[in-house]
């Protein structure tokens, strides 16, 4: 049955009038209900920057206009503009009742804003679908999932189409029309109706809108029933129960972080922008001066009124810069992310390949050349200039548009499950903020304090557990007689002892120790010797020796090969054992077909042929069967991607789960102790969690800091089999490190 709760005198066709009390009586007795809301703008159109703060999504700028709640038997559509929802709050807070919601962060933010409540026991159909098909599909919209899961056709999902105008009147369906398995007609309802709510104001809801509301909670419920069955992997049923619980619970934590927002000192930001612009102008002048002194053909000609040559290259134009470097034969080609073809490039990765090891090291250490008198030093200076340019363009004055006009805080929207299950965010990208002190000082609490807490060497701890590295595990347990707890000195010493074939001492200031972080992470994450060569400024052969020394020193060779082989055979990667979350490589069939095609060209006795014959045969095939090299390239490209991901996703996935469990534990503590208005998480960035404590609870900041530390270290012990990555708190008015 479908019910409408509002002030309409005449009941809508197909709906019965009901009361909010009757709705509560029904839903409070269910074990599972479905939930959805629609929102209406609060402020006149155009009053605020709607490119950043969308009026239908932002809880500070909208009102809940409709609430839909129920199950497959009964759906209650409530006009929230005239009906108080307070009576339903206990249902939302009840941890015994499962709340099925599609993209639950949206609902959580709005109920936080309007009622200061926490929705407990969420089942987010979008998040669970991501878990079940991580990597395998790209779209997790309600429409896409309904088509895939429920087998609904386009016409049955016309509520999701945008091919009808807002003025189209509802046409009642023929009474003899076939009903679906749940007794619903195959209605034509426009998904653009959702956008109608934003501008609807106080006008009575149309039948289309109410029908849309009822339908919008039945589809997620039906999807939920299918999701409970999990999916079949290698003829076995699979469902990541704890993974689903962790991710579903995390939806509220992320919603709260988005809603609370990050305190940003706009004046400090402008000061930082001013400092960065001074550096930018100095570097711009340096590269212009070199061109003016050495490359007159790229300058405006001197004349009576302008006796000195002036550089005419627009440094923001890649094509103009490419022309310059091509004239020096210093412009390499790089595979384009857009076209997939080799194209001329002046990106950092491409240009660094042409630099000497000395210049590469200078770039890594951020040492801008004092004198620019060679093309190589100019190349180095240009790369530094581009870094400065990014700071003033991406993180300049325009970035302040992300400061909310009502809250005066930044509110990053979190994307919960990327491929590795790490977090990302947009509007603004919290993970992409420069990690320098001048930018961190801009994240500042006015009257309270920030508790800044990050894991110590989280990725190294995780990698040591994933790969069962006995030397590393022993170091974390006992330390080292020479290096104590300095993990990077210890790792560098062990690596280079093997490289040099003798005992190697590594102090904290040595170049080897400084490079060790890069060596460790790139190797752990499956990076090649070519990538490492560019990163630390050494020859490829030297980089290979270093990687081999690192793998041998820490017993990584066997687990590396095991995980690569496992991924190639199964097509999926277990991201962490505790949650059983997985990544499914989407191109397994394409990779297998490419390999079969490529191998079909090879003679059966290929292995027994001499090197000369092999080379001759390859040359012949390249002319007569050009598809050979292409198919083999396709296969090797996919193979390389999958093998790298078999290494890096395990470590990243484990780190992601660790941070989420820690954040969830701390949030539970805060809400249990009714501290949610004065102590709250405001940011998650890689291995860091940031908590704000208001002036009211300032005296107890150390209690909350130690609690956050406890939550983070407990999460580490849980996922790493009692191995604890330390997480000691810092207390500061700004984001400290």
Image: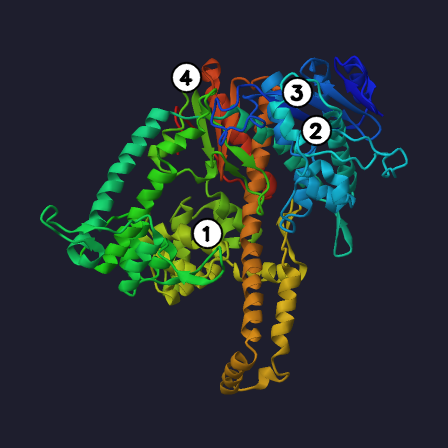
The residue singled out by tag 3 in the image is 65
> Disc 1 vs disc 2: Cβ atoms closer than 8 Å?
no
Real-space CA distance between mark 4 and mark 2, rounded to the nearest whole angstrom: 34 Å
What is the crowding at mark 4: few (fewer than 14 residues within 10 Å), some, or many (at least 20)? few
Alpha-carbon distance for marks 1 and 2? 37 Å
Label 1 close to label 4 by CB (< 8 Å) = no
Q: Is residue 26 above or below residue 137?
A: above
Q: Nearer the viewer, mark 1 or mark 2?
A: 2
Residue 725 locus on image (x, y percent)? 50, 40
Instruction: Point out the image quarter for the C terminus.
Output: top left
Judged from the image, the secondary structure of the residue bearing numbered disc 1 is helix
Mark 1 vs mark 3, CA separation in Å: 49 Å
Which residue is the site of mark 2? 121
Counting residues from the start of the chain, the first of labels 3 and 4 encountered is: 3
N-term-proximal mark, 2 vs 3? 3
Whether residues under marks 2 and 3 lie with C-beta atoms below 8 angstroms apart, the answer is no
Residue at 70% of width from left, 29% of height from top? 121
Q: Is residue 440 left or right of residue 213?
A: left
Q: What is the x, y in percent for residue 150?
A: 78, 43
Q: Is residue 723 left or right of residue 7?
A: left
Quarter that holds the N terminus: top right
**Residue at the disc numbered 4:** 447
Q: Is residue 166 above or below residue 373?
A: above
């Amino acid at each position: 049955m479908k019910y409408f709760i509002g002030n309409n005198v005449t009941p809508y066709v197909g709906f019965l009038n009901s009361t909010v009390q009757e709705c509560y009586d029904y839903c409070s007795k269910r074990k599972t209900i479905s939930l959805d809301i629609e929102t209406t703008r609060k402020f006149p159109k155009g009053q605020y920057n709607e490119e950043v703060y969308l009026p239908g999504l932002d809880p500070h700028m909208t009102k809940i206009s409709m609430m839909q709640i129920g199950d497959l038997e009964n759906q209650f559509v409530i006009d929230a503009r005239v009906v108080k929802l307070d009576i339903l709050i206990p249902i939302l807070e009840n941890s015994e009742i499962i709340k099925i919601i599609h993209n639950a962060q949206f609902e959580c933010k709005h109920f936080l804003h309007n009622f200061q409540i926490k929705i407990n026991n969420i089942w987010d159909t979008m998040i669970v679908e991501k878990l079940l098909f991580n990597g395998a599909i790209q779209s997790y919209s309600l429409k896409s999932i309904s088509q895939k899961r429920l087998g609904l056709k386009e016409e049955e999902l016309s509520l999701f189409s945008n091919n009808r105008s807002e003025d189209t009147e509802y046409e009642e369906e023929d009474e003899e029309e076939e009903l679906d398995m749940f007794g619903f007609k195959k209605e034509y309802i426009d998904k653009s109706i959702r956008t109608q709510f934003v501008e609807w104001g106080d006008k009575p809801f149309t039948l289309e809108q109410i029908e849309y509301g009822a339908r919008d909670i039945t589809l997620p419920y039906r999807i939920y029933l299918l999701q409970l069955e999990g999916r079949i992997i290698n003829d076995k049923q699979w469902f990541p129960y704890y993974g689903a619980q962790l991710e579903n619970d995390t939806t509220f934590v992320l919603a709260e972080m988005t809603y609370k927002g990050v305190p940003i000192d706009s004046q400090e930001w402008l000061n930082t922008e001013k400092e960065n612009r001074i550096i930018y102008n100095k570097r711009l002048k340096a590269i212009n001066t070199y061109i003016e002194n050495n490359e007159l053909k790229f300058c405006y000609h001197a004349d009576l009124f302008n006796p000195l040559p002036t550089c005419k290259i627009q440094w923001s134009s890649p094509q103009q810069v490419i022309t310059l470097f091509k004239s020096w034969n210093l412009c390499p080609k790089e595979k384009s992310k857009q076209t997939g073809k080799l194209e001329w490039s002046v990106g950092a990765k491409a240009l660094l390949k042409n630099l000497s090891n000395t210049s590469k090291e200078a770039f890594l250490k951020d040492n801008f050349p004092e004198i620019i008198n060679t093309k190589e030093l100019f190349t180095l200076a240009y790369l530094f200039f581009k870094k400065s340019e990014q700071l003033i363009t991406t993180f300049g004055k325009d970035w302040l548009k992300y400061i909310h006009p009502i809250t005066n805080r930044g509110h990053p929207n979190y994307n919960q499950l990327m491929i590795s299950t790490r977090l990302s965010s947009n509007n603004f990208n919290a993970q992409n903020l420069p990690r320098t002190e001048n930018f961190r000082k801009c994240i500042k609490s006015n009257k309270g304090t920030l508790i800044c807490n990050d894991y110590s060497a989280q990725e190294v701890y995780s990698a040591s557990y994933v790969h069962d590295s006995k030397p590393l595990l022993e170091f974390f347990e006992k330390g080292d007689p020479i290096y104590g707890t300095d993990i990077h000195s210890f790792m560098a010493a062990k690596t280079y002892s093997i490289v040099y074939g003798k005992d190697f001492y590594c102090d904290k200031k040595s170049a080897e120790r400084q490079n060790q972080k890069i060596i460790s992470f790139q190797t752990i994450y499956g990076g090649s010797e070519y990538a490492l060569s560019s990163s630390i400024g050494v020859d490829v052969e030297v980089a290979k020796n270093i990687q081999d020394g690192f793998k041998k020193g820490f017993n990584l060779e066997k687990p590396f090969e095991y995980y690569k082989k496992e991924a190639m055979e199964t097509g999926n990667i277990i991201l962490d054992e505790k949650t059983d979350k997985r990544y499914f490589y989407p191109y397994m069939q394409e990779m297998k077909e490419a390999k079969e095609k490529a191998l079909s060209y090879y003679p059966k006795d290929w292995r027994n042929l001499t090197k000369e014959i092999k080379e001759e045969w390859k040359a012949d095939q390249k002319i007569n069967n050009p598809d050979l090299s292409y198919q083999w390239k396709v296969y090797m490209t996919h193979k390389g991607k999958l093998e790298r991901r078999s290494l890096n996703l395990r470590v990243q996935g484990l780190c992601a789960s660790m941070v989420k469990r820690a954040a969830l534990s701390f949030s539970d503590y805060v809400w249990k102790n009714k501290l949610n208005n004065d102590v709250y998480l405001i940011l998650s960035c890689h291995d860091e969690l940031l908590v704000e404590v208001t002036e009211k609870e300032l005296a107890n900041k150390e209690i909350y800091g130690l609690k956050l530390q406890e939550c983070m270290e407990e999460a580490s012990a849980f996922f790493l089999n009692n191995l604890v990555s330390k997480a000691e708190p810092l207390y500061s008015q700004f984001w400290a490190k």
